Amino acid sequence: MQRRHFIHTLSTAVLSLQALTLARQAFAQVPPTTPPAAPHWRSNPFALGVASGEPRPDAVLLWTRLYPGAPAVGESASRLQLWAHFQEQSGLNAQQACVVHYDVFSDEALRHRVKQGQVRTHAGRGWSVHARVTGLEPNRPYWYRFRCGEAVSPVGRTRTAPALGAATAQMRIALTSCQHYEQGYYAAHAEIAQQSLDVVLFAGDYIYESSNPKYRIRPHTGGIPSTLDQYRERHALYKLDPDLQACHAAHPWVCTWDDHEVENDYAGVHNIRYQDAESFLQRRAAAYQAYFEHMPVWPGANDHGPHQRIHSHYQWGDLVDWWMLDCRQYRNAQPCRDPLKGGGRVVVACDERDDPRRTMLGSAQEQWFSDSFKAAKAHWRLVVQSTQISSTSLPTPVGRSIFTDGWDGYPVARQRLIHTLAQAPKGTVVTLGGDVHMNVAADLRQVPNDPHSPIVAAELVTTSITSRGMGESTLARIREHNPDIRHARSDERGYTLIDVQREHITATFRATPHPVQAGATLSTQAQYTLRHGEPGLARQ
Ligand SMILES: [Fe+2]
Protein backbone atom coordinates (compact mmCIF):
# COMPACT_ATOMS: atom_id res chain seq x y z
CA MET A 1 0.00 0.00 0.00
CA GLN A 2 1.39 3.42 -0.89
CA ARG A 3 1.92 5.82 1.98
CA ARG A 4 -0.48 8.38 0.52
CA HIS A 5 -3.15 5.71 0.19
CA PHE A 6 -2.53 4.53 3.76
CA ILE A 7 -2.98 8.03 5.17
CA HIS A 8 -6.15 8.48 3.15
CA THR A 9 -7.51 5.16 4.41
CA LEU A 10 -6.62 6.07 7.98
CA SER A 11 -8.30 9.48 7.77
CA THR A 12 -11.41 7.86 6.29
CA ALA A 13 -11.50 5.43 9.22
CA VAL A 14 -11.22 8.26 11.78
CA LEU A 15 -13.85 10.22 9.94
CA SER A 16 -16.26 7.32 10.10
CA LEU A 17 -16.46 7.32 13.91
CA GLN A 18 -18.05 10.75 14.20
CA ALA A 19 -19.42 11.61 10.82
CA LEU A 20 -21.00 8.28 9.99
CA THR A 21 -23.10 8.51 13.14
CA LEU A 22 -24.38 11.94 12.12
CA ALA A 23 -24.93 10.84 8.56
CA ARG A 24 -26.94 7.84 9.75
CA GLN A 25 -29.14 10.14 11.85
CA ALA A 26 -29.73 12.40 8.86
CA PHE A 27 -30.38 9.57 6.46
CA ALA A 28 -34.16 9.55 6.54
CA GLN A 29 -34.65 13.31 6.84
CA VAL A 30 -34.62 14.64 3.29
CA PRO A 31 -35.71 17.20 2.29
CA PRO A 32 -34.62 19.07 5.42
CA THR A 33 -36.92 20.98 7.68
CA THR A 34 -34.30 22.80 9.71
CA PRO A 35 -33.22 26.31 8.68
CA PRO A 36 -30.32 26.60 6.23
CA ALA A 37 -26.92 26.55 7.88
CA ALA A 38 -23.66 28.29 7.02
CA PRO A 39 -20.99 25.90 5.74
CA HIS A 40 -17.30 26.10 6.56
CA TRP A 41 -15.58 24.39 3.67
CA ARG A 42 -12.42 22.37 4.12
CA SER A 43 -12.19 21.68 0.38
CA ASN A 44 -13.50 23.30 -2.80
CA PRO A 45 -17.25 22.58 -3.11
CA PHE A 46 -17.24 23.67 -6.77
CA ALA A 47 -15.03 20.81 -7.96
CA LEU A 48 -17.55 19.93 -10.70
CA GLY A 49 -17.42 23.42 -12.20
CA VAL A 50 -20.28 25.58 -13.42
CA ALA A 51 -22.57 25.48 -16.43
CA SER A 52 -25.37 27.35 -18.14
CA GLY A 53 -28.09 26.38 -20.55
CA GLU A 54 -31.46 27.01 -22.14
CA PRO A 55 -30.74 30.54 -23.47
CA ARG A 56 -33.88 32.61 -24.02
CA PRO A 57 -34.12 36.29 -25.02
CA ASP A 58 -34.54 37.38 -21.39
CA ALA A 59 -33.34 34.38 -19.40
CA VAL A 60 -30.71 31.72 -18.92
CA LEU A 61 -30.32 28.74 -16.60
CA LEU A 62 -27.26 28.55 -14.33
CA TRP A 63 -26.05 25.28 -12.80
CA THR A 64 -23.61 23.97 -10.25
CA ARG A 65 -23.51 21.22 -7.65
CA LEU A 66 -21.82 21.32 -4.26
CA TYR A 67 -19.34 18.46 -4.45
CA PRO A 68 -16.31 18.66 -2.16
CA GLY A 69 -14.48 15.79 -3.88
CA ALA A 70 -15.03 12.06 -3.67
CA PRO A 71 -14.68 10.41 -0.24
CA ALA A 72 -12.58 7.57 -1.66
CA VAL A 73 -10.66 8.68 -4.73
CA GLY A 74 -10.76 6.04 -7.46
CA GLU A 75 -13.22 3.91 -5.52
CA SER A 76 -16.96 3.83 -4.98
CA ALA A 77 -18.47 4.95 -1.67
CA SER A 78 -21.67 4.06 0.10
CA ARG A 79 -24.32 6.70 0.70
CA LEU A 80 -23.33 6.91 4.36
CA GLN A 81 -19.70 7.48 3.42
CA LEU A 82 -20.76 10.14 0.90
CA TRP A 83 -22.83 11.97 3.49
CA ALA A 84 -20.15 11.66 6.15
CA HIS A 85 -17.57 13.06 3.75
CA PHE A 86 -19.86 15.94 2.81
CA GLN A 87 -20.42 16.72 6.50
CA GLU A 88 -16.73 16.67 7.24
CA GLN A 89 -15.83 18.88 4.30
CA SER A 90 -18.70 21.37 4.73
CA GLY A 91 -19.18 21.59 8.49
CA LEU A 92 -22.88 21.04 7.81
CA ASN A 93 -25.06 18.34 9.17
CA ALA A 94 -26.34 16.50 6.11
CA GLN A 95 -29.94 17.01 7.24
CA GLN A 96 -29.55 20.79 6.93
CA ALA A 97 -30.16 22.83 3.81
CA CYS A 98 -27.56 25.14 2.41
CA VAL A 99 -27.96 28.41 0.55
CA VAL A 100 -25.94 29.06 -2.60
CA HIS A 101 -25.72 32.62 -3.93
CA TYR A 102 -25.25 33.53 -7.56
CA ASP A 103 -24.07 36.75 -9.20
CA VAL A 104 -24.51 37.72 -12.85
CA PHE A 105 -22.29 40.38 -14.44
CA SER A 106 -22.50 42.29 -17.70
CA ASP A 107 -18.72 42.44 -18.10
CA GLU A 108 -15.91 39.91 -18.08
CA ALA A 109 -14.02 41.86 -15.40
CA LEU A 110 -17.02 41.30 -13.06
CA ARG A 111 -17.32 45.01 -12.21
CA HIS A 112 -20.98 45.43 -13.11
CA ARG A 113 -23.26 43.02 -11.29
CA VAL A 114 -26.70 43.06 -12.93
CA LYS A 115 -28.42 40.19 -11.12
CA GLN A 116 -28.03 38.28 -7.89
CA GLY A 117 -30.04 35.68 -6.09
CA GLN A 118 -29.91 32.55 -4.00
CA VAL A 119 -30.94 28.94 -4.27
CA ARG A 120 -31.57 26.57 -1.37
CA THR A 121 -30.24 23.07 -1.89
CA HIS A 122 -29.93 19.91 0.18
CA ALA A 123 -28.86 16.28 0.14
CA GLY A 124 -32.18 15.11 -1.32
CA ARG A 125 -31.29 16.80 -4.59
CA GLY A 126 -27.62 15.86 -4.42
CA TRP A 127 -26.72 19.44 -3.43
CA SER A 128 -27.42 20.50 -7.01
CA VAL A 129 -28.20 24.13 -7.85
CA HIS A 130 -30.34 25.39 -10.72
CA ALA A 131 -31.01 29.12 -10.98
CA ARG A 132 -33.21 30.43 -13.77
CA VAL A 133 -32.15 34.06 -14.12
CA THR A 134 -34.73 36.29 -15.80
CA GLY A 135 -34.96 39.97 -16.71
CA LEU A 136 -31.80 39.87 -18.83
CA GLU A 137 -31.17 41.77 -22.05
CA PRO A 138 -31.41 39.84 -25.32
CA ASN A 139 -28.52 38.85 -27.56
CA ARG A 140 -25.56 39.54 -25.33
CA PRO A 141 -23.01 37.72 -23.17
CA TYR A 142 -23.11 37.53 -19.38
CA TRP A 143 -20.66 36.20 -16.80
CA TYR A 144 -21.66 34.43 -13.60
CA ARG A 145 -20.35 32.73 -10.49
CA PHE A 146 -21.68 31.08 -7.35
CA ARG A 147 -20.81 31.57 -3.69
CA CYS A 148 -21.44 29.26 -0.75
CA GLY A 149 -20.05 30.25 2.61
CA GLU A 150 -16.48 31.40 1.95
CA ALA A 151 -16.18 29.36 -1.25
CA VAL A 152 -16.41 31.05 -4.66
CA SER A 153 -16.90 29.11 -7.89
CA PRO A 154 -15.03 29.51 -11.16
CA VAL A 155 -16.53 32.13 -13.49
CA GLY A 156 -18.75 30.98 -16.35
CA ARG A 157 -19.68 32.83 -19.50
CA THR A 158 -23.13 32.53 -21.03
CA ARG A 159 -25.37 34.48 -23.37
CA THR A 160 -28.99 35.24 -24.11
CA ALA A 161 -30.82 34.60 -27.39
CA PRO A 162 -31.77 37.47 -29.69
CA ALA A 163 -35.23 38.97 -29.12
CA LEU A 164 -38.07 36.96 -30.63
CA GLY A 165 -38.34 37.77 -34.31
CA ALA A 166 -35.38 40.20 -34.25
CA ALA A 167 -33.36 40.42 -37.46
CA THR A 168 -30.44 38.06 -36.87
CA ALA A 169 -27.56 37.45 -39.27
CA GLN A 170 -25.72 34.51 -37.74
CA MET A 171 -25.79 31.67 -35.23
CA ARG A 172 -22.80 29.45 -34.48
CA ILE A 173 -23.34 26.00 -32.95
CA ALA A 174 -21.16 23.10 -31.81
CA LEU A 175 -23.06 19.82 -32.21
CA THR A 176 -21.82 17.08 -29.85
CA SER A 177 -22.73 13.59 -28.60
CA CYS A 178 -21.42 10.31 -27.16
CA GLN A 179 -18.60 11.00 -24.71
CA HIS A 180 -17.61 7.63 -23.27
CA TYR A 181 -15.14 8.58 -20.53
CA GLU A 182 -13.19 5.36 -20.78
CA GLN A 183 -12.64 5.54 -24.53
CA GLY A 184 -10.67 8.77 -24.80
CA TYR A 185 -9.96 12.30 -23.65
CA TYR A 186 -12.17 15.31 -24.24
CA ALA A 187 -9.96 17.16 -26.73
CA ALA A 188 -13.09 18.12 -28.65
CA HIS A 189 -14.42 19.98 -25.61
CA ALA A 190 -11.08 21.74 -25.16
CA GLU A 191 -11.35 23.07 -28.72
CA ILE A 192 -15.05 23.95 -28.45
CA ALA A 193 -14.28 25.95 -25.29
CA GLN A 194 -11.97 28.15 -27.39
CA GLN A 195 -14.46 28.67 -30.24
CA SER A 196 -16.55 31.77 -30.70
CA LEU A 197 -19.99 30.19 -30.35
CA ASP A 198 -23.58 30.90 -29.43
CA VAL A 199 -24.57 27.50 -28.10
CA VAL A 200 -23.42 23.89 -27.66
CA LEU A 201 -26.05 21.31 -28.60
CA PHE A 202 -25.70 17.88 -26.99
CA ALA A 203 -27.57 15.07 -28.77
CA GLY A 204 -27.25 12.30 -26.16
CA ASP A 205 -25.01 9.75 -24.39
CA TYR A 206 -23.57 12.28 -21.93
CA ILE A 207 -22.51 9.46 -19.61
CA TYR A 208 -22.12 5.77 -20.34
CA GLU A 209 -23.41 3.25 -17.85
CA SER A 210 -21.47 0.41 -19.46
CA SER A 211 -17.86 -0.43 -20.04
CA ASN A 212 -15.89 -2.15 -22.81
CA PRO A 213 -12.50 -3.42 -21.57
CA LYS A 214 -11.22 -3.54 -25.18
CA TYR A 215 -11.27 0.25 -25.51
CA ARG A 216 -10.34 1.52 -22.07
CA ILE A 217 -8.00 4.55 -22.01
CA ARG A 218 -9.03 5.65 -18.48
CA PRO A 219 -11.35 3.65 -16.22
CA HIS A 220 -14.74 4.46 -14.77
CA THR A 221 -15.06 4.21 -11.00
CA GLY A 222 -17.77 1.85 -9.83
CA GLY A 223 -19.55 -0.81 -11.83
CA ILE A 224 -22.70 -0.47 -13.94
CA PRO A 225 -24.91 2.06 -12.11
CA SER A 226 -28.48 1.24 -11.20
CA THR A 227 -29.13 3.32 -8.05
CA LEU A 228 -29.33 7.10 -7.60
CA ASP A 229 -26.00 7.20 -5.74
CA GLN A 230 -24.30 5.18 -8.46
CA TYR A 231 -25.61 7.38 -11.27
CA ARG A 232 -24.54 10.46 -9.27
CA GLU A 233 -21.04 9.02 -8.94
CA ARG A 234 -20.87 8.40 -12.70
CA HIS A 235 -22.01 11.94 -13.53
CA ALA A 236 -19.56 13.42 -11.03
CA LEU A 237 -16.68 11.46 -12.57
CA TYR A 238 -17.48 12.88 -16.02
CA LYS A 239 -17.94 16.40 -14.67
CA LEU A 240 -14.52 16.28 -12.99
CA ASP A 241 -12.89 16.30 -16.44
CA PRO A 242 -11.25 19.74 -16.90
CA ASP A 243 -11.94 19.97 -20.67
CA LEU A 244 -15.63 19.19 -20.19
CA GLN A 245 -15.76 21.78 -17.38
CA ALA A 246 -14.10 24.36 -19.63
CA CYS A 247 -16.64 23.74 -22.39
CA HIS A 248 -19.56 24.14 -19.98
CA ALA A 249 -18.06 27.30 -18.51
CA ALA A 250 -17.51 28.83 -21.97
CA HIS A 251 -20.97 28.44 -23.58
CA PRO A 252 -24.61 27.75 -22.79
CA TRP A 253 -25.63 24.19 -23.63
CA VAL A 254 -28.97 22.83 -24.78
CA CYS A 255 -29.30 19.09 -24.29
CA THR A 256 -31.32 16.04 -25.03
CA TRP A 257 -30.53 12.45 -24.05
CA ASP A 258 -30.21 9.05 -25.65
CA ASP A 259 -30.03 5.58 -24.09
CA HIS A 260 -26.73 5.46 -22.18
CA GLU A 261 -27.84 8.07 -19.65
CA VAL A 262 -29.92 5.15 -18.34
CA GLU A 263 -29.00 1.86 -20.05
CA ASN A 264 -27.92 0.72 -23.51
CA ASP A 265 -30.83 0.32 -25.95
CA TYR A 266 -33.62 0.94 -23.48
CA ALA A 267 -36.88 1.78 -25.21
CA GLY A 268 -39.67 3.42 -23.21
CA VAL A 269 -40.38 1.01 -20.35
CA HIS A 270 -38.43 -1.86 -21.96
CA ASN A 271 -34.83 -2.81 -21.28
CA ILE A 272 -32.65 -5.42 -22.88
CA ARG A 273 -33.03 -7.91 -20.01
CA TYR A 274 -36.83 -7.95 -20.20
CA GLN A 275 -36.96 -6.60 -16.66
CA ASP A 276 -40.53 -5.93 -15.50
CA ALA A 277 -41.59 -2.38 -16.28
CA GLU A 278 -42.01 -1.36 -12.64
CA SER A 279 -38.45 -2.35 -11.70
CA PHE A 280 -36.98 -0.77 -14.80
CA LEU A 281 -38.88 2.47 -14.19
CA GLN A 282 -37.33 2.68 -10.70
CA ARG A 283 -33.91 2.55 -12.32
CA ARG A 284 -34.99 5.05 -15.00
CA ALA A 285 -36.19 7.42 -12.27
CA ALA A 286 -32.80 7.20 -10.50
CA ALA A 287 -30.93 7.83 -13.76
CA TYR A 288 -33.18 10.74 -14.74
CA GLN A 289 -32.85 12.36 -11.31
CA ALA A 290 -29.05 12.13 -11.41
CA TYR A 291 -29.12 13.51 -14.96
CA PHE A 292 -31.12 16.60 -14.01
CA GLU A 293 -29.01 17.13 -10.88
CA HIS A 294 -25.87 17.36 -13.02
CA MET A 295 -27.02 19.16 -16.14
CA PRO A 296 -27.89 22.74 -17.07
CA VAL A 297 -31.38 21.48 -17.85
CA TRP A 298 -34.34 22.83 -15.89
CA PRO A 299 -35.50 20.14 -13.43
CA GLY A 300 -38.92 21.69 -12.98
CA ALA A 301 -40.74 18.37 -13.25
CA ASN A 302 -38.15 16.43 -11.31
CA ASP A 303 -40.71 15.07 -8.87
CA HIS A 304 -42.30 13.04 -11.64
CA GLY A 305 -39.84 10.20 -11.11
CA PRO A 306 -39.36 8.14 -14.25
CA HIS A 307 -41.47 10.53 -16.36
CA GLN A 308 -39.51 13.66 -17.23
CA ARG A 309 -40.04 15.99 -20.13
CA ILE A 310 -36.89 17.08 -21.91
CA HIS A 311 -38.16 17.89 -25.43
CA SER A 312 -38.32 21.61 -26.09
CA HIS A 313 -38.43 24.39 -28.68
CA TYR A 314 -36.08 27.37 -29.04
CA GLN A 315 -35.76 30.42 -31.27
CA TRP A 316 -32.76 32.46 -32.33
CA GLY A 317 -34.27 35.76 -33.47
CA ASP A 318 -35.79 35.46 -36.93
CA LEU A 319 -32.94 33.20 -38.10
CA VAL A 320 -33.56 29.79 -36.50
CA ASP A 321 -36.35 27.81 -34.90
CA TRP A 322 -34.97 24.64 -33.35
CA TRP A 323 -36.35 21.65 -31.50
CA MET A 324 -34.74 19.18 -29.09
CA LEU A 325 -36.55 15.83 -29.37
CA ASP A 326 -36.60 12.84 -27.00
CA CYS A 327 -36.19 9.56 -28.91
CA ARG A 328 -35.98 7.26 -25.86
CA GLN A 329 -38.58 7.88 -23.21
CA TYR A 330 -41.75 7.34 -25.22
CA ARG A 331 -40.75 4.87 -27.94
CA ASN A 332 -42.03 1.35 -28.52
CA ALA A 333 -39.65 -1.54 -28.04
CA GLN A 334 -37.41 -2.37 -30.99
CA PRO A 335 -39.22 -4.67 -33.45
CA CYS A 336 -38.51 -8.41 -33.68
CA ARG A 337 -36.42 -8.53 -30.51
CA ASP A 338 -34.27 -11.53 -29.70
CA PRO A 339 -36.22 -13.36 -26.96
CA LEU A 340 -32.99 -13.97 -25.04
CA LYS A 341 -31.56 -10.45 -25.30
CA GLY A 342 -33.68 -7.41 -26.00
CA GLY A 343 -32.65 -4.09 -27.49
CA GLY A 344 -31.49 -3.49 -31.04
CA ARG A 345 -30.16 -6.09 -33.46
CA VAL A 346 -29.74 -6.62 -37.19
CA VAL A 347 -32.78 -8.31 -38.75
CA VAL A 348 -33.88 -9.05 -42.30
CA ALA A 349 -37.53 -10.09 -42.47
CA CYS A 350 -39.50 -8.29 -39.74
CA ASP A 351 -43.12 -7.43 -40.46
CA GLU A 352 -43.56 -5.96 -36.99
CA ARG A 353 -41.51 -2.91 -37.92
CA ASP A 354 -44.13 -1.82 -40.49
CA ASP A 355 -46.95 -1.64 -37.92
CA PRO A 356 -48.30 1.93 -38.28
CA ARG A 357 -49.01 2.14 -34.53
CA ARG A 358 -45.30 2.00 -33.74
CA THR A 359 -43.78 5.22 -32.45
CA MET A 360 -40.32 6.68 -31.83
CA LEU A 361 -41.40 9.98 -30.23
CA GLY A 362 -44.67 8.92 -28.60
CA SER A 363 -47.96 10.33 -29.85
CA ALA A 364 -48.01 13.39 -27.55
CA GLN A 365 -44.49 14.55 -28.45
CA GLU A 366 -45.11 13.78 -32.12
CA GLN A 367 -48.25 15.93 -32.14
CA TRP A 368 -46.51 18.72 -30.20
CA PHE A 369 -43.61 18.70 -32.66
CA SER A 370 -45.85 18.65 -35.72
CA ASP A 371 -47.92 21.59 -34.44
CA SER A 372 -44.88 23.60 -33.35
CA PHE A 373 -42.97 22.91 -36.56
CA LYS A 374 -45.84 23.98 -38.79
CA ALA A 375 -46.31 27.21 -36.79
CA ALA A 376 -42.60 28.15 -36.98
CA LYS A 377 -41.68 31.20 -39.02
CA ALA A 378 -37.91 31.50 -38.83
CA HIS A 379 -35.60 31.53 -41.85
CA TRP A 380 -34.17 28.06 -40.96
CA ARG A 381 -35.49 25.08 -38.98
CA LEU A 382 -33.12 22.75 -37.11
CA VAL A 383 -34.45 19.49 -35.67
CA VAL A 384 -32.15 17.97 -33.04
CA GLN A 385 -32.76 14.33 -32.12
CA SER A 386 -30.46 11.67 -30.82
CA THR A 387 -29.65 9.44 -33.80
CA GLN A 388 -29.41 9.07 -37.59
CA ILE A 389 -32.61 9.37 -39.62
CA SER A 390 -31.32 8.27 -43.03
CA SER A 391 -31.23 4.52 -43.63
CA THR A 392 -28.17 2.33 -43.09
CA SER A 393 -29.85 -0.83 -44.41
CA LEU A 394 -27.95 -3.38 -46.52
CA PRO A 395 -29.10 -5.77 -49.26
CA THR A 396 -29.08 -9.52 -48.58
CA PRO A 397 -30.39 -12.43 -50.69
CA VAL A 398 -33.59 -12.45 -48.62
CA GLY A 399 -34.24 -8.71 -48.38
CA ARG A 400 -32.58 -5.69 -46.80
CA SER A 401 -31.11 -6.00 -43.33
CA ILE A 402 -31.73 -3.21 -40.84
CA PHE A 403 -30.54 -2.30 -37.34
CA THR A 404 -33.67 -2.11 -35.24
CA ASP A 405 -32.62 0.43 -32.59
CA GLY A 406 -32.40 3.35 -35.06
CA TRP A 407 -35.07 5.01 -37.21
CA ASP A 408 -34.76 2.00 -39.58
CA GLY A 409 -36.64 0.05 -36.89
CA TYR A 410 -39.44 2.65 -36.89
CA PRO A 411 -40.00 3.29 -40.63
CA VAL A 412 -43.65 4.36 -40.44
CA ALA A 413 -42.87 6.84 -37.65
CA ARG A 414 -39.96 8.08 -39.79
CA GLN A 415 -42.34 8.65 -42.71
CA ARG A 416 -44.62 10.69 -40.44
CA LEU A 417 -41.61 12.76 -39.36
CA ILE A 418 -40.53 13.27 -43.00
CA HIS A 419 -44.09 14.27 -43.87
CA THR A 420 -43.99 16.95 -41.16
CA LEU A 421 -40.58 18.21 -42.32
CA ALA A 422 -41.94 18.46 -45.88
CA GLN A 423 -44.42 21.14 -44.72
CA ALA A 424 -41.61 23.70 -44.49
CA PRO A 425 -40.38 25.72 -47.49
CA LYS A 426 -37.84 23.84 -49.61
CA GLY A 427 -34.22 24.07 -48.52
CA THR A 428 -34.87 25.39 -45.00
CA VAL A 429 -34.72 22.26 -42.80
CA VAL A 430 -31.69 20.51 -41.32
CA THR A 431 -31.89 17.56 -38.94
CA LEU A 432 -29.05 17.13 -36.44
CA GLY A 433 -28.18 13.91 -34.63
CA GLY A 434 -25.55 11.77 -32.91
CA ASP A 435 -25.50 8.23 -31.46
CA VAL A 436 -23.89 6.38 -34.38
CA HIS A 437 -20.31 7.53 -33.71
CA MET A 438 -19.67 8.76 -37.24
CA ASN A 439 -19.90 11.96 -39.21
CA VAL A 440 -22.77 11.77 -41.68
CA ALA A 441 -24.04 14.20 -44.30
CA ALA A 442 -27.17 12.91 -46.03
CA ASP A 443 -30.24 13.87 -48.01
CA LEU A 444 -33.58 13.05 -46.44
CA ARG A 445 -35.99 12.26 -49.27
CA GLN A 446 -39.72 11.64 -49.27
CA VAL A 447 -38.89 8.08 -50.38
CA PRO A 448 -35.53 7.08 -48.84
CA ASN A 449 -32.77 6.17 -51.30
CA ASP A 450 -34.93 6.93 -54.35
CA PRO A 451 -32.92 9.47 -56.38
CA HIS A 452 -36.11 10.63 -58.14
CA SER A 453 -37.85 11.45 -54.86
CA PRO A 454 -37.72 15.07 -53.66
CA ILE A 455 -35.24 16.04 -50.94
CA VAL A 456 -37.16 17.20 -47.87
CA ALA A 457 -34.28 18.07 -45.52
CA ALA A 458 -30.53 17.89 -45.08
CA GLU A 459 -29.19 15.61 -42.37
CA LEU A 460 -26.03 16.18 -40.34
CA VAL A 461 -24.95 13.61 -37.77
CA THR A 462 -21.93 14.37 -35.61
CA THR A 463 -19.32 11.82 -34.71
CA SER A 464 -18.76 10.99 -31.05
CA ILE A 465 -16.58 13.00 -28.71
CA THR A 466 -14.78 9.74 -27.77
CA SER A 467 -16.95 6.63 -28.30
CA ARG A 468 -15.65 4.09 -30.81
CA GLY A 469 -17.28 3.84 -34.24
CA MET A 470 -18.17 0.88 -36.45
CA GLY A 471 -15.67 -0.90 -38.70
CA GLU A 472 -14.73 0.66 -42.04
CA SER A 473 -15.67 -2.36 -44.20
CA THR A 474 -19.29 -2.37 -42.97
CA LEU A 475 -19.50 1.39 -43.38
CA ALA A 476 -18.16 1.17 -46.95
CA ARG A 477 -21.03 -1.21 -47.81
CA ILE A 478 -23.54 1.11 -46.11
CA ARG A 479 -22.32 4.05 -48.20
CA GLU A 480 -22.42 1.96 -51.38
CA HIS A 481 -26.01 0.78 -50.87
CA ASN A 482 -27.55 3.98 -49.46
CA PRO A 483 -27.17 6.74 -52.06
CA ASP A 484 -28.83 9.29 -49.75
CA ILE A 485 -25.67 9.19 -47.62
CA ARG A 486 -23.24 11.72 -49.08
CA HIS A 487 -20.56 11.38 -46.42
CA ALA A 488 -19.97 8.86 -43.63
CA ARG A 489 -16.77 8.30 -41.65
CA SER A 490 -16.58 6.35 -38.41
CA ASP A 491 -12.80 6.33 -37.80
CA GLU A 492 -12.50 9.76 -36.18
CA ARG A 493 -13.85 11.42 -33.06
CA GLY A 494 -14.81 15.08 -32.60
CA TYR A 495 -17.74 17.44 -33.08
CA THR A 496 -19.50 19.42 -35.80
CA LEU A 497 -19.28 23.18 -36.09
CA ILE A 498 -22.44 24.60 -37.65
CA ASP A 499 -22.37 28.16 -38.93
CA VAL A 500 -25.88 29.39 -39.74
CA GLN A 501 -26.08 32.47 -41.92
CA ARG A 502 -29.00 33.78 -43.93
CA GLU A 503 -27.67 32.62 -47.31
CA HIS A 504 -26.32 29.26 -46.24
CA ILE A 505 -25.47 26.84 -43.45
CA THR A 506 -21.93 25.49 -43.33
CA ALA A 507 -21.13 22.33 -41.37
CA THR A 508 -17.51 21.57 -40.53
CA PHE A 509 -16.67 18.12 -39.20
CA ARG A 510 -13.80 18.68 -36.72
CA ALA A 511 -12.09 15.40 -35.91
CA THR A 512 -9.08 13.47 -34.64
CA PRO A 513 -8.24 9.75 -35.01
CA HIS A 514 -9.52 7.19 -32.52
CA PRO A 515 -8.74 6.87 -29.67
CA VAL A 516 -8.47 10.50 -28.56
CA GLN A 517 -5.17 11.10 -26.78
CA ALA A 518 -4.76 13.71 -24.05
CA GLY A 519 -3.97 17.06 -25.70
CA ALA A 520 -4.93 15.84 -29.20
CA THR A 521 -5.57 18.52 -31.81
CA LEU A 522 -8.48 18.34 -34.22
CA SER A 523 -8.54 19.07 -37.93
CA THR A 524 -11.24 19.45 -40.56
CA GLN A 525 -12.42 16.12 -41.94
CA ALA A 526 -14.93 17.61 -44.40
CA GLN A 527 -17.15 20.63 -44.90
CA TYR A 528 -20.67 20.76 -46.34
CA THR A 529 -22.88 23.70 -47.27
CA LEU A 530 -26.63 24.00 -47.70
CA ARG A 531 -27.79 27.07 -49.61
CA HIS A 532 -31.04 28.56 -48.38
CA GLY A 533 -33.97 27.52 -50.56
CA GLU A 534 -32.01 24.84 -52.42
CA PRO A 535 -32.31 21.14 -51.63
CA GLY A 536 -29.24 19.06 -50.93
CA LEU A 537 -25.84 19.52 -49.31
CA ALA A 538 -22.78 20.47 -51.35
CA ARG A 539 -19.26 19.46 -50.35
CA GLN A 540 -16.79 22.32 -50.15
FE1 LIG B 1 -23.22 6.63 -28.08
Image: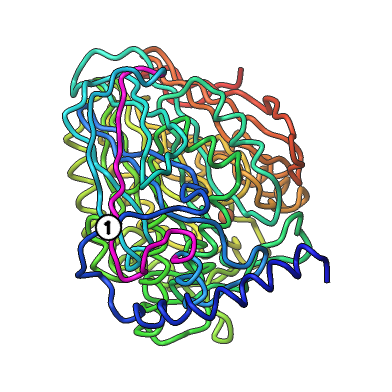
Compared with 318, 252 (above or below) is below
Q: Residue at x 39, y 71 (%)?
A: 286
Q: Which residues are magenta?
A: 87-108
Q: Residue at x 72, y 67 (%)?
A: 7
Determine if the magenta segment contains residue 99: yes
The amino acid pointed to by label 1 is: Arg
Compared with 509, 222 (above or below) is below
Q: Residue at x 52, y 35 (%)?
A: 247
Determine if the magenta segment contains residue 449: no
Q: Nearer the viewer, residue 428 or 204?
A: 204
Q: Nearer the viewer, residue 220 or 540?
A: 220
Q: Residue at x 55, y 32 (%)?
A: 496
Task: Report crowding for label 1: few under 14, some 14 to 19, many 20 or more residues within 10 A (C-alpha).
Answer: some
Q: Give residue 388's position: percent from left, percent from top.
A: 50, 48
Q: Which residue is mark 1?
A: 309
Visible in this render: residue 455? Answer: no
The quadrant the C terminus occupies is top right
Q: How is the image coloured?
A: rainbow
Q: Is residue 118 found left or right of 182 in the rendered image?
A: left
Q: Give residue 504's position: percent from left, percent from top.
A: 43, 16
Q: Is residue 17 found left or right of 254 in the rendered image?
A: right
Q: Give residue 49's position: percent from left, percent from top.
A: 48, 43
